[in-house]
Image (tube, helix red, strand yellow):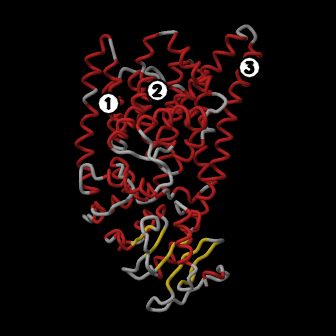
Amino acid sequence: MTGRATDRWAAALAALHLGHSLWFARLYPDAIHDPDLLAYFVYFANWAAGVTALHDVSYFTVPKPLLVFALGPLASAPAAFAVSALVSSALGALVYLIARDAFGRTPAILASLLLLLDVERATLTLHSSADLYVAFFLFAAIRCTTMRRYVLSGVAIAAATLIKPVALPCVLHLLAVDGDDRRRARLAALVPLLAVPLLFAANVALVGAPFGPARFFAGFDAMSQGELMPTGELVRFVVWVQLVKTSFASTAPLGVIGLVTWVARDRRRLTSPLVLVPMLFLGGYVAMSLRVPFVPFFRFFWPLQVCFSAFIVFAAVETAQSLASERPALRAALCAALLGFLADDLVTRQLHYRTRFAQPFQNAMAFVERARPVLRRERAPGESLLTPLVFLPYALWTLDDARAAPSLIATAEHAENTGDPDWILWVPHAFLDRATRDRVGRLAGSGRYTALVSAGDAALLARIDRQPPLALRAPGAPAYLN
């Protein structure tokens, strides 16, 4: 909404984003079973049943309270994806509306359209990722502030905080509002503070302590291949590694030019929410790293990436305008050429991601979905399962008794001495490191297990001496598994 009338471009772009999300989901239908999403289902199911088993585990997915209580009741990955697709389409419209007011209609349309090429947007939507929802609420806050609806802006930041507390510093942008609205904005800045006690209460309910999730960060970092990022290196990682070297390898200078040009035309724009909110969001991560070191992933900082791409588009349009203001055809050609570099950056990264990550994850989840009914039917209550860490939430969600007794599920990355578990979910490329994969591979090929389901090099294995003896065996299973 413009505040006066509906902008039809916003509706059209929202529809395009929705269609693109549905198309992407058709390419990778099983990838909607994201581990974090399934963890929300597990958290909610345990909370609803009064089960506190997750209060004592050393590692599980860090809870995102708002998503646990919003998506958890759905208990369905397709239903959660439907919600996420709608949120993603609304985000596409928000990017257009914010960019329209900041840069003009043409750059705004182009910024939203080019977002369709961003593989992060597609995969975050597919996975119902917390980072998608955080981005949506932060952009909603930016939009509300520019429309002088400060209380709604505070509510949006509170919602983002209930997903990831690092969003809380974004409330400080309301303190930069000047003029007649200054008092209203400062009062609205109190709204997100209400999220803090709610966050602590949710953590107590879900993991047993207000700061309980901190132990999960430590548990993941201990077995991750990534390196803990020193606080001083975090900003360099985001600005240089993510934005310049990886996401916008050939167009990052345009983004800098666009930002500098936009601010130079009106110095008051230094306090614009379009500038302050992304900076404060990064500041939230920097502050967290001082207390809880963590392994950073690009998706954590995706809102900054979206903002920066909008400045790249603005710079391309302005450059074309300044070089060929009187020749529309040449101006369009110049703009298309400059944006072609941005499109190339985005498409190159998308193809790389889809080949290296999206398709392997789809294949792995397709196999696990195929193995699920056999595991549920053949496994006796109380039998143990060894699995790669990534499938831990899936196993807990699939096996009712395991939700109440998580120790039945051993994650290979956590278990140095696994013994002989009753079941092994053997998906070689899903392990975090080669040493773990080799160790579990020796156990899988020891001759003590038989494959009930197999596909390629993946298999669901059951210990042969289980009682009663298993009658099923996968035809054509790899010889070393039989």
Tell which circle, 1 or 2, labels the residue nearer the N-terminal end: 2
| Residue type, numbered disc 1 | Gly
Residues at circles 1 and 3 in contact by the CB criterion of under 8 Å: no
Horizontal arrangement in the rendering, residue 225 relative to residue 203 (left or right)? right
Residues at circles 3 and 2 in contact by the CB criterion of under 8 Å: no
Residue 6 drawn above or below residue 480: above
Q: From the image, tell me which residue sits under label 1.
A: 154
Q: From the image, tell me which residue sits under label 2.
A: 1
- Separation of disc 1 and disc 3 at Cα? 41 Å
Instruction: For label 1, count other residues whose C-alpha is less than 10 Å away and answer few (under 14), some (14-19) or many (20+).
Output: many
Instruction: For label 3, count other residues whose C-alpha is less than 10 Å away and answer few (under 14), some (14-19) or many (20+).
Output: some
| Residue type, numbered disc 3 | Leu
Q: Of residues 256 and 455, which is closer to you in this image?
A: 256
* Residue 52 % position (x, y): 26, 64
- Separation of disc 3 and disc 2 at Cα? 31 Å
Q: From the image, tell me which residue sits under label 3.
A: 334
Which residue is located at x 34 percent, y 40 percent? Answer: 165
